[in-house]
Image: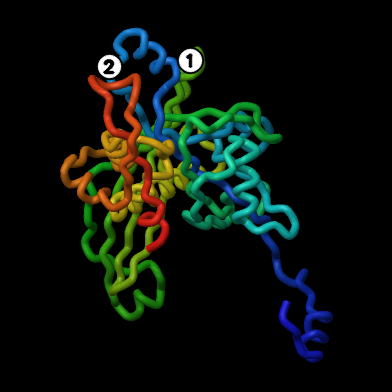
């Protein structure tokens, strides 16, 4: 800390921080990867090794072993220790549960609404975490007894625009200013088929975008959910849309889902999986040309013939 004046020092000595309510601070991670199912991979190799493996966007969830929400599925995470930065909390918790220490981590959102956690006022800093799933070794934490990858499926009903409506804030009503509201209903489904019986989590979430003059705000209302702990259904949707937006505008974020070496087809496939739609190969390769470096290695064990392997161009990815 920089040197402070005697006056400020005396002020700080008399300052009583307990006069204000203080929340608990937590870090949660929306951990995404792109990979295939192990059992299906084995069957594919036995049946037809030439077929490219089918991969899906997957999300890591923890089954809670204690109250609240015992036996429900939650994002991995935990509380900050005294003196610990929130990002360091996220790194620590992620390593404890996956044994991955070099994952891409980016703050996606902060959630601290009243009533979101029955234990009290808890503010969650939710991080988007991405890595190659093959590097992961799952290990449940102290408050959980199961950890699994879930296939992510997201469907959106056609966005509808409501007629101009009075803003809900009274001061805008008094000024008779109007806004536009756009609503989208998302149907989020998470499926795990690793066990004897499939596990299916579902949620219906209404997204409301309010536009007033040049300002915009977005709310997420869970209309129905099954199997999720806390408010994690809406947080998962928020993180997934955040990931898709970045992949749409830039695309470089997808590299953090890839192994060190990959084919251009694998890279495009991963981007399509994240976005939930097909891309034109020529346009995609032109967009990614500066971000990849061709190697002298070739792919093995999949496809009709070996393909050139690439790796990310670190200079182009990180040095802009």
Q: Is residue 25 visible?
A: yes
Left or right: where does residue 156 sit relative to residue 171? left
Quadrant including the C terminus: bottom left
| Residue 315 at x, y percent in the picture | 39, 56
Q: Earlier in the sequence, mark 2 or mark 1?
A: 2
Residue drawn at the location 41% of the way across and 52% of the way down: 314
**Residue matched to label 2:** 50
Q: Is residue 255 above or below residue 269?
A: below
**Residue matched to label 1:** 197
* Occupied quadrant, residue 166: bottom left
Of marks 2 and 1, the one in the foreground: 2
Residue drawn at the location 58% of the way across and 29% of the way down: 137
Quadrant including the N terminus: bottom right
Graded by Cα atoms within 10 Å as few (under 14), some (14 to 19) or many (20 or more), the crowding at tag 2 reads few
Residue drawn at the location 63% of the way across and 30% of the way down: 139
C-alpha span from label 2 to label 1: 30 Å
* Occupied quadrant, residue 136: top right
Graded by Cα atoms within 10 Å as few (under 14), some (14 to 19) or many (20 or more), the crowding at tag 1 reads few
* Residue at the limit of the structure toward the top, as seen here: 47
Q: Is residue 197 above or below residue 263?
A: above
Left or right: where does residue 316 sit relative to residue 160? right
Of residues 41 and 191, which is closer to you in this image?
41
Left or right: where does residue 136 sit relative to residue 312? right
């Amino acid at each position: 800390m920089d040197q402070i004046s005697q006056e400020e020092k005396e002020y700080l000595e008399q300052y009583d921080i307990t006069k204000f309510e203080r929340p608990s601070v937590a870090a949660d991670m929306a951990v995404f990867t792109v990979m295939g199912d192990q059992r299906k991979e084995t069957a594919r190799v036995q049946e037809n090794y030439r077929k490219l493996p089918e991969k899906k966007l997957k999300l890591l969830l923890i089954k809670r072993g204690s109250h609240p929400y015992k036996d429900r599925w939650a994002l991995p995470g935990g509380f900050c220790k005294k003196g610990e930065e929130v990002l360091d909390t996220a790194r620590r918790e992620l390593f404890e549960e996956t044994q991955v220490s070099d994952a891409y981590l980016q703050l996606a959102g902060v959630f601290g609404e009243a009533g979101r956690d029955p234990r009290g006022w808890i503010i969650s800093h939710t991080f988007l975490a991405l890595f190659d799933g093959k590097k992961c070794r799952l290990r449940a934490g102290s408050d959980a007894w199961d950890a699994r990858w879930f296939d992510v499926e997201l469907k959106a009903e056609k966005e509808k625009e409501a007629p101009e409506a009075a803003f809900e804030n009274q001061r805008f009503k008094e000024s008779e200013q109007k806004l536009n509201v756009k609503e989208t209903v998302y149907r989020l489904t998470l499926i795990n088929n690793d066990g004897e019986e499939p596990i299916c989590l579902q949620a219906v979430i209404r997204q409301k975008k309010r536009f007033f003059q040049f300002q915009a705000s977005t709310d997420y209302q869970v209309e129905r959910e099954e199997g999720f702990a806390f408010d994690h259904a809406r947080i998962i949707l928020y993180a997934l849309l955040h990931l898709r937006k970045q992949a749409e505008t830039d695309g470089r974020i997808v590299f953090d889902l890839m192994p060190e070496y990959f084919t251009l087809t694998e890279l495009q496939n991963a981007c399509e999986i994240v976005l939930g739609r097909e891309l034109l190969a020529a346009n995609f390769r032109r967009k990614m040309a500066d971000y990849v470096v061709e190697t002298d290695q070739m792919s093995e064990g999949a496809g009709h013939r070996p393909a050139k392997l690439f790796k990310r161009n670190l200079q182009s990815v990180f040095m802009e």
